[in-house]
């Protein structure tokens, strides 16, 4: 059974950010991720996780310029801040966004930046995550597929750099999700789900059979987080019916 995590940057968007932690915990989530927690102090974010007995799953680096030549200092500053927030909240995963670039030096820049970032994260037990995105929603983005991500990971040559596999993006770019997931489980440290072709909650009218993919992951021994990274079609609780089979109770009353 997947360990489902709430994405608090997208879910429960009708209530204030710090109130979303309580809502996520109340309906049964045990982990939560935030894309950009930096509007709040790291101590405040960390305490809110603890108050609601939620595991901090991941914080993005910002700005996302890892593969953009000339912006190495901005990337390094984002890494330092993200790792500080992660350490305060007990979070081990820091996604490093490649950014938009077609410069022929982009791969070298990204690899060099990640090697330095790996050394910064390692003393605190941190993992760096690389997330390929689809080019339809993100034109010009440097990192766009699992094979390319594996190449970058191999070039970095460090054991704390992993693939963050989002099913929404990879269905658009690659398809063959079950095959691709199992072929890359050795480098996957985090998975995210959403509906395709519209990035909303998984349901019956979509291209991706999530229960089948969850079974594939169970059979393959995947035991890390699967995060719900989507904006709900309507009210967030109403969009959690699929999650009921995996320990989430969306019918719980708000207080």
Image: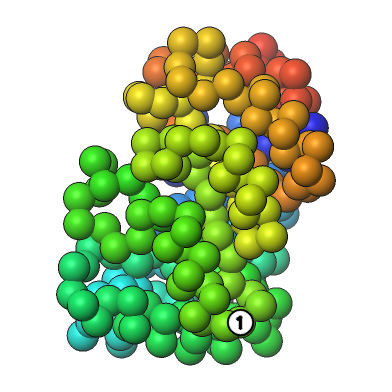
Mark 1, residue position: 158
Compared with 21, 90 (above or below) is below
Q: Where residue 25 appears, x then y in whole percent? A: 69, 35
Q: Identify the image quadrant of the N terminus.
A: top right
For numbered disc 1, what is the local secondary structure?
Answer: loop
Foreground pick, 67 / 35: 67
What residue lies at 35% left-to-right and 24% top-to-bottom?
A: 198
Foreground pick, 68 / 54: 68
Left or right: residue 201 compared with residue 210: left
Q: Where residue 56 appears, x then y in whole percent? A: 65, 55
Left or right: residue 62 compared with residue 242: left
What residue lies at 57% left-to-right and 83% top-to-bottom?
A: 157
Compared with 25, 165 (above or below) is below
Q: Where residue 122 appears, x then y in whole percent? A: 65, 83
What residue lies at 55% left-to-right and 37% top-to-bottom?
A: 177
Residue 14 visible to an observer of this rendering: no
Q: Identify the image quadrant of the C terminus.
A: top right
Left or right: residue 145 compared with residue 150: left
């Amino acid at each position: 059974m997947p360990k489902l995590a709430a994405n608090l940057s997208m879910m429960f968007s009708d209530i204030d950010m710090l109130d979303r932690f309580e809502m996520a915990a109340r309906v049964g989530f045990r982990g939560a991720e935030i894309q950009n927690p930096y509007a709040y102090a790291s101590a405040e974010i960390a305490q809110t996780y603890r108050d609601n007995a939620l595991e901090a799953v991941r914080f993005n680096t910002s700005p996302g310029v890892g593969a953009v030549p000339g912006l190495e200092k901005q990337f390094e500053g984002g890494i330092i801040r993200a790792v500080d927030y992660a350490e305060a909240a007990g979070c081990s995963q820091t996604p490093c966004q490649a950014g938009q670039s077609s410069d022929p030096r982009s791969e070298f820049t990204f690899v060099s930046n990640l090697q330095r970032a790996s050394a910064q994260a390692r003393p605190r037990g941190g993992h760096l995550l690389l997330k390929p995105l689809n080019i339809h929603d993100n034109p010009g983005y440097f990192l766009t597929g699992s094979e390319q991500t594996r190449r970058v990971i191999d070039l970095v040559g460090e054991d704390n750099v992993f693939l963050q596999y989002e099913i929404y993006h990879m269905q658009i770019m690659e398809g063959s999700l079950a095959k691709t997931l199992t072929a890359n489980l050795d480098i996957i440290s985090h998975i995210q789900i959403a509906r395709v072709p519209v990035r909303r909650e998984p349901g019956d009218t979509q291209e991706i059979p999530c229960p089948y993919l969850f079974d594939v992951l169970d059979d393959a021994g995947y035991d890390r987080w699967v995060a719900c990274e989507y904006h709900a079609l309507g009210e967030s609780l109403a969009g959690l019916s699929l999650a009921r089979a995996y320990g989430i109770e969306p019918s719980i009353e708000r207080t």
